[in-house]
Image (cartoon, rainbow, N blue to C red):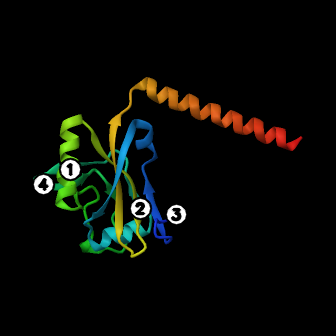
Amino acid sequence: MTSKPAPSGKTFKTIIENRRARHEYHILETYEAGIELKGTEVKSLRAGKSNLQDSYARVDNGELILYNMHISPYEQGNRFNHEPKRNRRLLMHKQEIMRLLGKIREKGLTLIPLKVYFNPRGRVKVELGLGQGKKSYDKRQDIAARDAKRDMDRAIRERQKV
């Protein structure tokens, strides 16, 4: 888990991050949403037992729903445990949800969860990205740029050693 400063100067703990999403999509905008969880799900998240791979969000009947997010069952949860891949409702203002719905329908964009974290008050939040799928040549360009940057950094470090 990493800690980053929040805009207010306080820190928040990142539980999980979907690094692959930034490789697969051009992220145009990001949004913060609360998530409706059960008690054993929060305990599993605190233990770091969750996965955002292949998850996405969609607006259904005016509600924002997160699909395919895997939260492992809590080890001491006995009969009160949750289903690992259940659909979870995301909490945003109705106006924000309608604005998102308009953008998704108009431009054919997708809502992808980028990371899940605890805010300073202890609430679980999800950072959603409004993304547009990348083509394979875009991905190759990103990889080439990353390799070039790595080579430049390596050359600079070697020059400083001498």
Tell me the kind of residue under disc 3: Lys
Closer to the eye: label 1 or 2: 1
Q: Amino acid at mark 1?
A: Arg
User: Height in image: 115 above or below 45?
Assistant: above
Q: Amino acid at mark 2?
A: Lys
Spatial CA span between label 2 and label 3: 20 Å
Q: Callout 3: helix, strand or loop?
A: strand
Q: Residues within 10 Å of mark 1 (few under 14, many from 20)?
A: few
Q: Are marks 2 and 3 in contact (CB under 8 Å)?
A: no
Image location of residue 70, percent across then percent down? 33, 55
Numbered mark located on residue 79 in the image: none
Which is more N-terminal, label 3 or label 1? 3
Q: Amino acid at mark 4?
A: Gly
- Please determine whether, in this image, residue 61 is positioned above or below residue 6: above
Say which label, 3 or 4, has the lower sequence index.
3
Q: Which residue is mark 2?
A: 49
Q: Are marks 4 and 2 in contact (CB under 8 Å)?
A: no
* SS assignment at label 2: loop
Position of 62 compared to 136: left or right? left
Q: Which residue is label 1 attached to?
A: 99
Task: Give the labeled residue for mark 4.
Answer: 62
Q: Nearer the viewer, mark 4 or mark 2?
A: 4
Find disc 3 in the rendering and name its residue. Answer: 4
Q: Earlier in the sequence, mark 4 or mark 1?
A: 4
List the single residue furthest toward the left: 61
Disc 2 crowd rating (10 Å Cα; few below 14, some 14-19, many 20+) is: some
